[in-house]
Image (tube, rainbow, N blue to C red):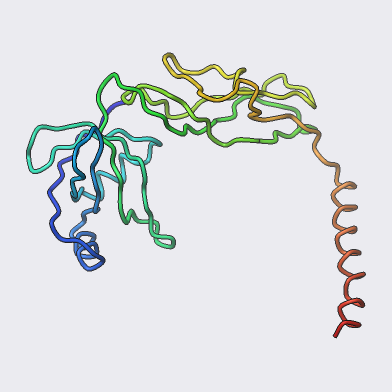
Amino acid sequence: MAENLISAVSRTEFGKGAARRSRRAGLVPAVLYGHGTDPVHVALPEHEVGLALRVANAVLEISIDGAKSQLALAKQVQRHPVRNYIEHLDLVIVRKGEKVTVEVPLLVVGEHPSDRMVIMDQQTITLEVEATHIPADVEVSVAGMEIGDTITAGDLKLPSGAVFPGEPNDLILSMAATPSQEALDAELAGGAEGEAVEEPEAAEEA
């Protein structure tokens, strides 16, 4: 994965007021740490950071106050719960060639008949991978799967150099039969009957 070169500036003001002023100036408050260094508080251009973070586990190439650039992995992104803008960013310093542990999205590919449905047990997979070669996703093919078939972590085709640190029999997904409309109607009817039975009991307690 290619790095994104971003120019940052040192940040000496802290607190909510300082954060609001940074955002009004089009900057994102962030902290950079790792490899035994003291945390460095910086501000990054919001537009460039937003573009870079469209990719999961983005690795940024950051130059602070014009100094020599260094690589950093976007470890934690805090977003506004309503407006979704980036409120704060945690960055971990990484080196080319070193391995990091990240959560990589699983991408289901392949066609299956309409009488079958995919049941996902996991949406991501933990991988140990080189910091500068983090995959955007890991594909999971469901083509040719029959009802009752499963895919485990050991069945996945991982990118070169990537290692799954968990158990190979960890369940990723399974193929199940699609419920018929009759079965769905019966389930809804059963739920409605259960609610109707509870109402007289509640009235007696009152």
Instruction: Point out the image quarter for the N terminus.
Output: top left
Q: Residue at x 26, y 22 (%)?
A: 96
Q: Is 166 left, or right, of 87 in this rendering?
A: right
Residue 110 or 73: which is nearer the viewer?
A: 73
Q: Residue at x 22, y 68 (%)?
A: 17
Location of residue 184 in the rendering, given as x and y in whole percent from the top left corner: 84, 49
Q: Is residue 43 above or below residue 150?
A: below
Kindly identify the residue that appears in the image at 47 percent across and 19 percent down.
163
Q: Position of residue 126 (x, y in %)?
A: 49, 30
Residue shown at the point (70%, 33%) measured from the top left: 118
How many numbered tags mark residues here?
Answer: 0
Which of the 4 image quadrants contains residue 3? top left
**Residue 110, quarter of the rendered image:** top right
Q: 160 left or right of 199?
A: left
Residue 193, how many percent across, how many down? 91, 64
Direction left: furthest residue:
66
Residue 54 in the image: x percent, y percent?
A: 37, 40
| Nearer to us in this view, 155 or 48 | 155
